[in-house]
Image (spheres, rainbow, N blue to C red):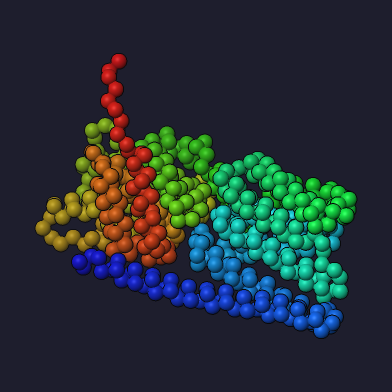
Amino acid sequence: MSETKPIENNKKIIDNNNNKKIIFANSIIIFACVIFLLTVAIIRFNIMDGRPLDKTIIPYVSLLVIFALCFCVILFALKYLDLPNYNTKMFGVICFIIAVNYAVCILIEKLSIFAMPVTLTVLLLSVFTNAKTAFLGNVFSALMLFITLTAMAVSGGQPIPQMLLPIIIFTITAGTILSIVINTDIRRFTYVIRGSAVNLISLPIIILYQLIIAPQSFMGLLSELPFAAFMVLGTVLLALLLQPIIEVIFNINSNFRFMELCDHHRPLLLRLAKSAPGTFNHSLTVANLAETCARAINENTYFARAAAYYHDVGKLNNTRFFKENQFNDTNPHDGLTPEVSCDIIRKHASQGKQVCAEYRIPQEIADITAEHHGTMPIFYFYNKAKEMTDREINIKEYCYQGPIPSSKVAAIIMICDAAEATVRAMKEPTYEKVEKTVKDIIDQRLRYGQFDNCDITLKELAIIKNTIVHAFGGLYHERIQYPEV
């Protein structure tokens, strides 16, 4: 019972924090709704009173609505949709992308409303975050443009642009499709083709709207088609141009970069496959598990796969000392004391970070190589040391040196790494045995405080456990015995 108390206490703390977040989020949303209704009321009463709208506070209230909506959308994304690897840097990236899209659209609107790169936000967010964040960012950008362009027209005594509403509908429709299709295959050529195709296919929405609402101005619409053609391809090319700029400014990696790192012909992966084939195949299996788990809890699947490929590169310095690379009966640990063997094993975490630096692997992946064992004890050599002496053994001398996981992806790889190694060692794995093993692995790391620094919830850990157990059913299924040829 004593072992379950820390887990129960953690659950109570997490539940209390979630309740506070829900109350705070609902309060902000209610505030935004009140501001929005107030804006509508002001517009209505000013029109009824016959006041010139450019003499009112409508533009200023509209800006207030924009900021309120901004705060609500971002808060909703962070708290409820699990923005991947959320930190101040990622928050800055999202705000920067939305701001750039907003500024470019406002400037180009002077030329033609059809030339605005309205899907730029979703194209950029799709390669830096996940589909849900890209969708939310796109909806928010559409709302910003609608409110701003309407406020600009009203405050200047001009009629609201007739094509504004269909443009906004186009933005949300095309952006929703793009947020889904872009994340399924992150390659530059595919990115350009899909981005341009979705924009092109979505254009009939504007034409159909114009035919239904104002057929008399259809010929004027045709004169705007060259600008629409510019928008279709220009938006995708602008997104490709801005991606490396954002990477440099914020020192962050896009999903394109993570996909490139997963190429098996990368120098470090080639070296791993040649020098430590057992570790390489273990990493491939962990990558499949980690990607599936990341998708299940809305984390960045490309980052998870890339990090899993490189998590054990520190073993390259002493490949023979790791069981998966021992292809004969000799074990170099047989002639060493448990203390020395333990030191060799645990160094692979810190040495992995050095190897990543040597091959210029991104910092967030290098961090996971050092974090994927956290500060867990190496029980095999700890128990072996206890058997060899009667004196009391300090378990801290047989622990990895950390640090503990600092992101949800690092926690996923920690669990998948231990689960793959343990289940592979089973002689006759069954569903019940695998389920119990994975549960024990997670509970053990909870007791040792390995997830205290990565903001992962018990619900997400349960999802990860079920995902791994289900995945192992496909990895280690039974095969029929074929007759000898």
Q: Residue at x 50, y 67 (%)?
A: 79
**Residue 395 against residue 353 in the figure, above or below:** below
In what quadrant of the picture does the N terminus appear?
A: bottom left
Q: Residue at x 15, y 55 (%)?
A: 386
Residue 356 visible to the viewer: no
Q: Which one is nearer the viewer's eye here, 206 or 90?
A: 206
The picture places residue 80, in percent across and down from the top left corner, at 50, 65
Q: Which one is nearer the viewer's eye here, 316 or 465?
A: 465
Residue 178 visible to the viewer: yes
**Residue 353 against residue 478 in the figure, above or below:** below
Q: Residue at x 41, y 62 (%)?
A: 456
The picture places residue 85, in percent across and down from the top left corner, at 50, 60
Q: Quadrant of residue 216?
A: bottom right
The picture places residue 128, in percent across and down from the top left corner, at 58, 55
The picture places residue 91, in percent across and down from the top left corner, at 58, 65
Please state if 249 lies on the left or on the right of 331 as rendered: right
Q: Residue at x 84, y 48 (%)?
A: 226
